Amino acid sequence: DGLRFRCTQCGNCCTGSPGYVWLSEFELRQIADHLGTTIGEIRVMHTKPALGQLSLADHANGDCTFLDGATRKCRIYPVRPAQCRTWPFWGKTVETEEAWQATCDVCPGAGRGELVPLDTIRRQVEESRL
């Protein structure tokens, strides 16, 4: 048992209404190292405080701060945060068949591609913290 998913790197999950992409200090350091800059610069230029935590910033149109406007690709894909890495396997997106179908409606890779085993999905739900 499981669900099918293959990331198409379409950028749909990186845009839309403003929201939160939670960051750990470890993830912040990975992003800074990947971009060859300082944690301080990433914190000032690309994050926002939210609900007592740190989140990636987004633009007025809802695009993530790291979504390239021209290519619609993630500029930090190799080191993207756990919340991004575990999409679409978040608790709220897989808790019911209706929730999964709604995810498939907005994500061209959901419901397609290789079968992701149920134990992998469970681990990703845990890792996503959502």
Image (cartoon, helix red, strand yellow):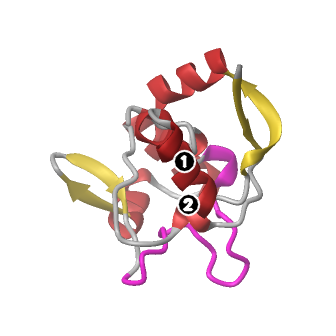
Which mark, by number, is residue 84? Answer: 1
Residue 114 in magenta stretch: no
Q: Quadrant of the C terminus?
A: top left
- Amino acid beneath label 1: Cys
Secondary structure, magenta segment, majority class: loop
Near mark 1 (Cα within 10 A), the count class, few <14, some 14-19 or many ≥20, is some
Q: Residue at x 54, y 64 (%)?
A: 14
Q: Position of residue 29 (x, y in %)?
A: 48, 43
Q: Residue at x 46, y 35 (%)?
A: 96
- Amino acid beneath label 2: Cys
Q: Quadrant of the N terminus?
A: top right
Q: Position of residue 22 (x, y in %)?
A: 37, 46
Residue 73 in magenta stretch: yes
Which mark, by number, is residue 13? Answer: 2
42 or 17, nearer to the observer: 17
Q: Position of residue 97 (x, y in %)?
A: 53, 38
Magenta span of residues: 60-79
Residue 74 placement, left or right of 42:
right
Say whether marks 2 and 1 touch (CB < 8 Å).
yes
Say above or below: 24 vs 22: above
Q: Secondary structure at mark 2?
A: helix
